[in-house]
């Protein structure tokens, strides 16, 4: 065979051809398939410049296939109730995810493990009930999280936002929160805006650490202070959360003096002696009654 050409089916190919060129149709097909996976757009959705818009389509489930280079994904204003585990695994370029106004009750564990570039997340107007520990694990570039208008949201785990040092805006307004652990916010060193109004806050002793933290950050952290009100206890119902002062929590710090302890000890001692004496008298009385009853029976016989 000529070293400078290849003979196939009786025809000589040009000297510049090589065996790799025979596989070119297969390579082209592979490229087409790959390109289709990258640029294919879900049915009914619109795709343009790495933006996929599937909002307002009355979807009951998330679209199964998205362009792999998707940066901005909107699934807002649908009826999506669940998201499959690992749904975002292949979309490592995702920066913005809009899931507002759906029917989400919870998010699958590890949903954001591959979302290292995600910066904006909107989960408002859903039915979320709690935010678990490390829900946003690996999504450490998040700057904005909106969890507002989740009326059944009653619990945020103390480590829900752990590691999100870039987070600047956090919206927890208009939910069902009655308490928020200080640990939830302490690690958010970059926080600028915090919205907590519209929740049924219980302004008891457990609220004091959070209020102290907020007062120290009020100059650096914008908050909807005028919308945050106490729901309980009854004596402060309707009072603005930030109207509470240190005097409001005075009863939480009552301390006993030495005289108080001595008085309590004395009262306890007296009560103990009285109890012993009472039991002794009751025992004697019962014994006498028993003997009198027995003596009466003997006389009748």
Image (cartoon, rainbow, N blue to C red):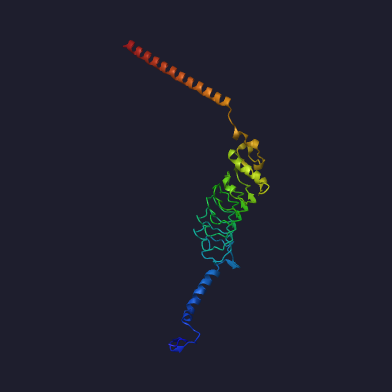
Q: Quadrant of the C terminus?
A: top left
Where residue 29 sits in the image (x, y, percent)? 49, 76
Q: Residue furthest top?
A: 299
- Using residue 57 as the reference point, say whether residue 22 is left or right of it: left
Q: What residue is shown at x 54% (from left), y 69% (from top)? A: 38
Number of callouts: 0
The reply to whether residue 202 is visible in this rendering is no
Q: Is residue 1 above or below residue 78?
A: below
Where residue 56 sits in the image (x, y, percent)? 59, 61
Q: What residue is shown at x 61% (from left), y 37% (from top)? A: 234
| Relative depth, front residue between 212 and 36 | 212
- Using residue 2 as the reference point, say whether residue 105 is left or right of it: right
Where residue 272 sits in the image (x, y, percent)? 48, 22
Q: Quadrant of the N terminus?
A: bottom left
| Relative depth, front residue between 6 and 225 | 6
The reply to whether residue 206 is visible in this rendering is yes
Q: What residue is shown at x 41% (from left), y 16% (from top)? A: 284
Q: Is residue 52 above or below residue 100?
A: below
| Relative depth, front residue between 40 and 152 | 40
Q: Is residue 290 above or below residue 107?
A: above
| Relative depth, front residue between 117 and 15 | 15
């Amino acid at each position: 065979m000529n070293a400078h050409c290849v003979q196939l089916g009786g025809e000589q190919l040009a000297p510049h051809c090589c065996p790799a060129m025979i596989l070119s149709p297969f390579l082209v097909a592979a490229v087409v398939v790959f390109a289709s996976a990258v640029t294919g757009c879900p049915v009914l959705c619109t795709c343009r410049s790495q933006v996929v818009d599937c909002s307002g389509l009355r979807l009951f489930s998330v679209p199964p296939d998205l362009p792999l280079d998707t940066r901005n994904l909107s699934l807002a204003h649908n009826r999506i109730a669940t998201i499959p585990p690992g749904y975002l695994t292949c979309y490592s370029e995702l920066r913005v995810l809009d899931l507002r106004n759906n029917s989400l009750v919870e998010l699958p564990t590890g949903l954001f493990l591959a979302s290292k570039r995600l910066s904006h997340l909107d989960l408002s107007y859903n039915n979320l009930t709690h935010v678990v520990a490390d829900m946003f694990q690996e999504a450490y570039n998040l700057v904005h999280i909106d969890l507002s208008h989740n009326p059944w949201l009653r619990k945020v785990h103390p480590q829900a936002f752990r590691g999100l040092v870039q987070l600047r805006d956090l919206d927890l307004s208009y939910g069902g929160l009655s308490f928020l652990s200080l640990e939830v916010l302490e690690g958010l060193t970059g926080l600028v805006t915090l919205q907590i109004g519209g929740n049924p806050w219980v302004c008891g002793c457990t609220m004091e650490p959070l209020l102290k933290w907020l007062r120290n950050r009020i100059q650096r952290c914008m908050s909807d202070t005028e919308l945050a009100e106490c729901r309980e206890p009854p004596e402060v119902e309707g009072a603005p959360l930030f109207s509470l002062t240190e005097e409001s929590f005075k009863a939480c710090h009552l301390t006993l003096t030495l005289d108080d302890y001595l008085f309590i000890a004395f009262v306890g001692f007296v009560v103990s002696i009285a109890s012993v004496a009472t039991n002794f008298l009751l025992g004697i009385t019962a014994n006498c009654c028993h003997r009198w009853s027995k003596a009466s029976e003997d006389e009748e016989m």
